[in-house]
Image (cartoon, rainbow, N blue to C red):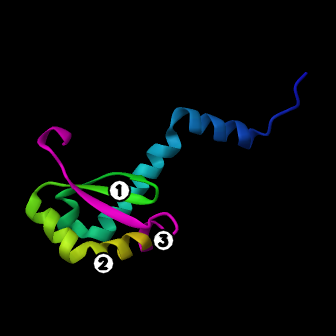
Amino acid sequence: MPAPVPVSQVLSELIALKGLSRVQGDQRLTNAWKQAAGEKIAGQTTVMGIKNRVVQVGVENSALLNELNSFHKKSLLTKLQQEYGKQDVRDMKFRLKSKTNK
């Protein structure tokens, strides 16, 4: 007979198996982005995900993409690190969203 497994371990494995932790993490990141970016910028952007602690943000048009990269990246990164966690975010990349990625 196998040894009993702690309920916490079983629940952790189930959550990982179902992908629920990723969904919750994605929502947390999206909410942190909305807080950091503000209503105007968040309305024209979409968090595409995070990989190697780099947040990927899709931007609706090239003018905004250029503005974010040139003038707002540093302040947005600082605000996002405050909202989401400095240990979780080290950088952000802005990418132009194509019409098919909406």
In x, y percent, where is residue 81?
Answer: 42, 71
The kind of residue tagged 1 is Thr
CB under 8 Å between discs 2 and 3: no
Residue 100 is a magenta residue: yes
| Pointer 2 residue | 75
14 or 49, nearer to the observer = 49
Numbered badge on residue 86:
3
Vertically, is 1 above or below 97?
Answer: above
The kind of residue tagged 2 is Ser
In x, y percent, where is residue 52?
Answer: 46, 55
In x, y percent, where is residue 23?
Answer: 44, 44
Q: Residue at x 30, y 78 (%)?
A: 75
**Furthest residue toward right:** 1
- Res 65 quadrant in image: bottom left
Q: In the image, which residues are magenta? A: 82-102
| Pointer 1 residue | 30
43 or 68, nearer to the observer = 68
Badge 2 or badge 1: first in the primary sequence: 1
Q: CA distance from mark 2 to mark 3?
A: 13 Å
- Res 60 quadrant in image: bottom left
The kind of residue tagged 3 is Lys
| Mark nearer the viewer, 2 or 1 | 2
Vertically, is 75 above or below 46?
Answer: below
